[in-house]
């Protein structure tokens, strides 16, 4: 039971102060005039003023509350290195026993794991949330057992009590780490990119000057280099193919270092073409000629060279050559000297007119077999004796004309195979397309028919010749969709996909295996024209093998999901198809620095005069210290008892009730009157 006197003024303090001043003047005047009852009047005025102040006797019934000590346990990945985990467990056991033996002390143990999204050790955020759940006037101390590698120091709260850090690890620890300082998301094929690498020895490491470095692409055979330690090195890298390239940089583990988790880094860079060079050769003008030109010119990554053959060599009209506004068709330059500079050649309603000698046509065949791409957009001339098929180009054209031209309306349809092919998959999607008005009847020799026309005749045929690709569109009516005839259709998307498939874009490969990462989970995707692709084998970074079935989720696409247990490079295999993917960040924050270092915590610890001690020197004893005093010393740490309490009951009794004031005041008035009357 605790008692105290409180004041509850009946009037504002300013008025009471004014009344006190007036009473003092009256008493002083009575004294100056020699009135014998001046001190009776003064006592009466004092009683009135005291009553106006409202004195109250307050009695509290209190129950003492225990002190709270937070015990933070760092259980992130870096705490598993060396002897840190053992040190942490021993320190926690000892500290918990000592705190519980003190009496009137509660221990709040807070275990801190790895933060999501590669956030590292988020100790300060966890401490802030824990402090919000407890009365701050009960917190007597905070003890953190950690390696000191905290990654959210900017989130540190205002501490109500001393913070002590017990640093795990050993003074002889050292580690070698690899850092990739810049890694672009995209790079141009054929052009070297400069990656800045750095290898550092941290801690009490050997006196080494150089370190070995291995670089591999897509899990292939690594190339070995030797680079100096502690120096930023620029390494030129040229991507071997388009699409995702997985580069792995590895420093072999050295004897005695803490871990090899930061000895490697995985960088995933998408290879893109700088400019796609397209040669468009048009025969006689027709409404669809502008369709091809507009499509290719709308793509900023395409360099288009377009020639329309208006004047064949045999044409004789009597106009002097020097008065012609047209230029001669540079056949030798385009089809002999610079043909390899083009990624795609398009023949739009072109026929043999004596402009391209047989030698040039042979060169086009070799261009395709060597990795080039040719698209034939057929018109009525394709069915005549002047057809390009009636030349050596028949070696690469996947279908020959039957000499029949079908001039009747028909609605293009995606074939069953086309429903699985990435060029046409999902295009129709149940919607009705507009009609085309002409179809050249062709008989496929090879290749894949992915679209059909009138009477289910082949409309779009794709084929691979050697390392190159060939497409035959057996109609010149695609422009009707662009004009919206009969409702139109996906002309732009179809021709865009077709052109990019021919140029070897990885996203449009009909037989492909790849994976997409989301944290430690990967989504394995297998695209195929087959009805069944079997299982995928996943090889983890430690060499463990896992086999998963691939389930068809949509026509031509099979998927599986897998949660990778470790960060690193995973290899995927399905039949003859292979892929690699890196899980986890390129440089995990938790392993960016693994040598124990609590220097970053020093300003926070010093704010409440706490201490930083090494666990390898022993678990410190615990003492009581007064607030504001040094809370740590050699071999000991201190907590501040808070003497907090809970009020169970409260009673308030007025010290000058009205009747008592009236009685006392009446006595003083009567006493003063009698004193003055006797005088």
Image: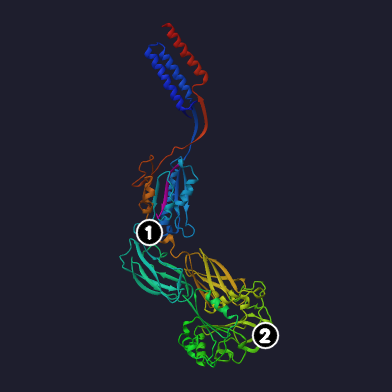
Crowdedness of circle 1 by 10 Å Cα count: few (<14), some, many (20+)? Answer: many
The image shows residue 489 at horizontal and vertical percentages of: 63, 74
User: Quick one: quadrant of the C terminus?
Assistant: top left
In which quarter of the view is residue 226 placed?
A: bottom left
- Does the segment drawn in magenta span residue 522? no
Asked if the stretch drawn in magenta spans residue 140, the answer is: yes
Visible residue check, residue 532? no
- Magenta-highlighted residues: 139-148
Q: Nearer the viewer, residue 60 or 55?
A: 55
Rate crowding at label 2 as few (under 14), some (14 to 19) or many (20 or more) other CA atoms within 10 Å: some
Which residue is found at the position 49% from the left and 60% from the top? 117
Q: Position of residue 104 (x, y in %)?
A: 46, 40
Q: How many marks?
A: 2
Colour scheme shown: rainbow
- Whether residue 74 sits left or right of residue 575 in the image: it is left
Secondary structure of residue under mark 2: strand
Residue, x 53% and y 68% (percent of image)? Answer: 516
Instruction: Measure the C-alpha gap from mark 2 to mark 1.
Output: 78 Å
Label 2 sits on residue: 406
Q: Position of residue 240 (x, y in %)?
A: 45, 76
Whether residue 83 is visible to the viewer of this picture, yes or no, is: yes
The first of marks 2 and 1 along the sequence is 2
**Label for residue 595?**
1
**Residue contact at pointers 2 and 1, CB within 8 angstroms:** no
Q: Is residue 494 above or below residue 203?
A: below
- Which structural element holds mark 1? loop
Query: Of discs 2 and 1, which sits in the foreground?
Result: 2
Label drawn at residue 364: none
In front: 317, or 416? Answer: 317
């Amino acid at each position: 039971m605790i008692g105290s006197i409180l004041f509850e003024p009946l009037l504002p303090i300013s008025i009471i102060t004014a009344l006190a001043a007036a009473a003092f003047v009256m008493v002083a005047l009575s004294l100056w005039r020699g009135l014998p009852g001046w001190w009776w009047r003064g006592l009466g005025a004092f009683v009135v003023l005291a009553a106006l102040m409202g004195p109250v006797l307050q009695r509290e019934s209190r129950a003492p509350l225990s002190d709270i000590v937070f015990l933070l346990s760092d259980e992130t990945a870096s705490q598993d290195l060396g002897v840190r985990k053992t040190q942490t467990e021993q320190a926690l056991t000892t500290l918990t026993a000592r705190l519980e033996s003190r009496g009137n002390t509660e221990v709040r143990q807070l275990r801190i794991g790895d933060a999501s999204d590669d956030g590292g050790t988020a100790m300060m955020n966890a401490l802030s949330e824990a402090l919000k759940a407890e009365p701050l006037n009960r917190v007597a101390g905070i003890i953190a057992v950690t390696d000191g590698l905290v990654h959210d120091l900017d989130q540190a709260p205002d501490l109500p009590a001393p913070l002590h850090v017990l640093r795990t690890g050993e003074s002889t620890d050292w580690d070698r780490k690899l850092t990739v300082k810049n890694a672009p998301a995209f790079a141009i094929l054929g052009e070297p990119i400069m990656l800045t690498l750095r290898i550092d020895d941290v801690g009490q490491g050997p006196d080494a000057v150089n370190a070995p470095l291995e670089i591999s692409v897509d899990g292939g055979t690594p190339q070995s280099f030797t680079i100096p330690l502690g120096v930023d090195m620029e390494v030129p890298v040229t991507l071997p193919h388009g699409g995702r390239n997985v580069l792995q940089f590895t420093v072999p583990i050295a004897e005695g270092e803490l871990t090899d988790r930061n000895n490697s880094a995985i960088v995933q860079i998408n290879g893109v073409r700088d400019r796609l060079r397209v040669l468009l050769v048009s025969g006689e003008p027709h409404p669809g000629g502008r369709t091809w030109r507009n499509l290719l010119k709308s793509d900023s990554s395409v360099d288009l060279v377009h020639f329309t053959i208006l004047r064949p060599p045999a044409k004789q009209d009597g106009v002097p050559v020097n008065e012609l506004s047209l230029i001669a068709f540079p056949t030798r330059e385009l089809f002999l000297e610079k043909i390899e500079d083009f990624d795609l050649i398009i023949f739009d309603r072109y026929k043999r007119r004596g402009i391209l000698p047989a030698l040039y046509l042979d060169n086009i065949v070799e261009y395709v077999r060597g990795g080039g791409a040719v698209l034939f957009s057929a018109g009525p001339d394709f069915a005549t004796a002047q057809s390009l098929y009636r030349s050596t180009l028949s070696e690469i054209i996947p279908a020959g004309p039957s000499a029949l031209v079908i001039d009747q309306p028909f609605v293009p349809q995606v074939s069953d195979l086309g429903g699985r092919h990435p060029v046409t998959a999902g295009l129709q999607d149940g919607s009705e397309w507009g009609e085309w008005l002409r179809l050249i009847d062709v008989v496929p020799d090879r290749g894949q028919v992915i679209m059909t026309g009138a009477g289910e005749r082949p409309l779009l045929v794709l084929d691979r010749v050697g390392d190159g690709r060939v497409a035959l569109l057996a109609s010149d009516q695609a422009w009707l969709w662009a004009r919206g005839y009969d409702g139109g259709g996906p002309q732009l998307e179809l021709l865009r996909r077709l052109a990019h498939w021919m140029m070897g874009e990885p996203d449009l490969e009909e037989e492909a295996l790849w994976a997409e990462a989301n944290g430690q989970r990967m989504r394995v995707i297998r695209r195929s024209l087959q009805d069944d692709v079997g299982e995928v084998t996943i090889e983890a970074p430690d060499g463990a093998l896992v086999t998963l079935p691939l389930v068809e989720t949509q026509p031509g696409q099979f998927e599986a999901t897998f949660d990778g247990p470790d960060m690193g490079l995973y290899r995927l295999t399905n039949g003859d198809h292979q892929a690699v993917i890196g899980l986890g960040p390129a440089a995990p924050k938790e392993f960016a620095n693994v040598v124990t270092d609590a220097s970053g915590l020093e300003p926070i610890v010093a704010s409440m005069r706490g201490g930083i001690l090494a666990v390898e020197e022993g678990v410190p004893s615990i003492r009581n210290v007064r607030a504001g005093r040094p809370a740590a010393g050699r071999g000991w740490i201190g907590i501040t008892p808070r003497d907090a309490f809970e009020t169970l009951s409260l009673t308030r009794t007025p010290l000058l009730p009205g009747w008592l004031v009236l009685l006392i005041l009446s006595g003083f008035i009567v006493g003063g009157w009698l004193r003055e009357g006797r005088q």
